[in-house]
Amino acid sequence: MALTCRECPWHELTSLHVGLGKVCLWILETGEDLRELPPQLPLFPLGAGTNLLGSDQDGAQLLRLAPPPLPSLVPKADGRLTVSAAVPLPQLASLCAKQGWTGLAPLSAIPGTLGGAIRMNAGAHGVAIADFLEEWIGVSLSTKKLLHWSKREGQGGFAYRHSPVPPDGLVLQATLQLLPGDPQIEQEAIRQERLRRQATNPQGPSAGSIFQNPPGDFAGRLLEAAGCKGLRRGPLVVSEKHANWILNPTAQPASAADALWLIREMQRRVPGLLPEVQIPFP
């Protein structure tokens, strides 16, 4: 059986190292392996954990898709690439660039998997992953029914940090439409984007932006004006560089209670902000 399970603490599965509870992590090789799961098991889909808070409670059942071997990823002659949703987005952008397929450079420094990027419609510089999507296939973990989205069939549902992937949906694979271009130019664009991110974003363990930008404004500006920089709780601190980021400078296990306290305090000071970070078990 290709399906495996191991017990581990939540904080090992999130980039912010948040969550003191223990979970059971199932690793899925293919969609067909879902048949091997115990019936009626409540499962939560997990990507790379780069935009996620864990829980202090024990017992969560998480399901992660195993990544494929990257050298096997080759777009077709027309630039269409069907790929596992478990592929890390930065590596996917680099691999496509080396083969002369372009477009993903603005997204190349966003951590996480392709499936996670689709779930939140990750974007930067006015470009979002939905701009390249032709199709995605997934499964509902509660019903085990197949999920299918197709641009060709006129399906929508994507917006700023929003997608038609349901909360219990696990994206298994996606088809992207890329553009032909100069490999060197695309690789340089990727290098410049990563340098820009290093210069502008706080460094250290984080979950990226905590809140979505409200229409016509920036969450970071509002939070800075509200005096949120430097707020601390346990090992967690609101970045002095960017007030919409929470850091865990020492990378020690942090409680979800401390993370939620900071998030709620930030919302108290700037009412109306919507979380961008995923909080599945508040």
Image: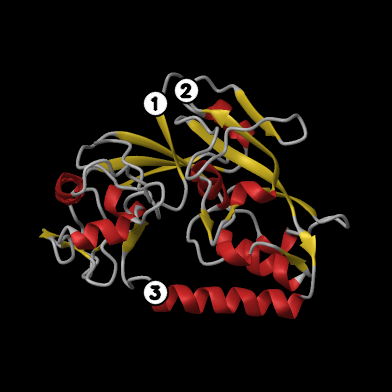
Q: How many marks?
A: 3
Say how the picture is coloured.
secondary structure
Residue ID for mark 1: 42
CA–CA distance in space, label 2 to label 3:
40 Å
Measured along the vertical axis of the image, is residue 256 above or below residue 123? above
Residue ID for mark 2: 142
Answer whether labels 1 and 3 touch (C-beta < 8 Å): no
Q: Earlier in the sequence, mark 2 or mark 3?
A: 2
Disc 1: CA contacts within 10 A as few (<14), some (14-19) or many (>=20): few
Q: Earlier in the sequence, mark 2 or mark 1?
A: 1
Q: Earlier in the sequence, mark 1 or mark 3?
A: 1
- Between disc 2 and disc 3, the foreground one is 3
Question: Which of the two residues, 267 or 180, is positioned nearer the viewer here?
Answer: 267
Residue ID for mark 3: 200
Determine the residue located farthest toward the front in the rendered image: 216
x%, y% of residue 278?
36, 43
Badge 3 element:
helix
Residue type at mark 2 is Ser
| Quarter of the N terminus within the rendering | top right
Residue type at mark 3 is Thr
Measured along the vertical axis of the image, is residue 164 above or below residue 221? above
Left or right: 246 as drawn, with respect to 140: left
x%, y% of residue 263?
21, 48
Disc 3: CA contacts within 10 A as few (<14), some (14-19) or many (>=20): few
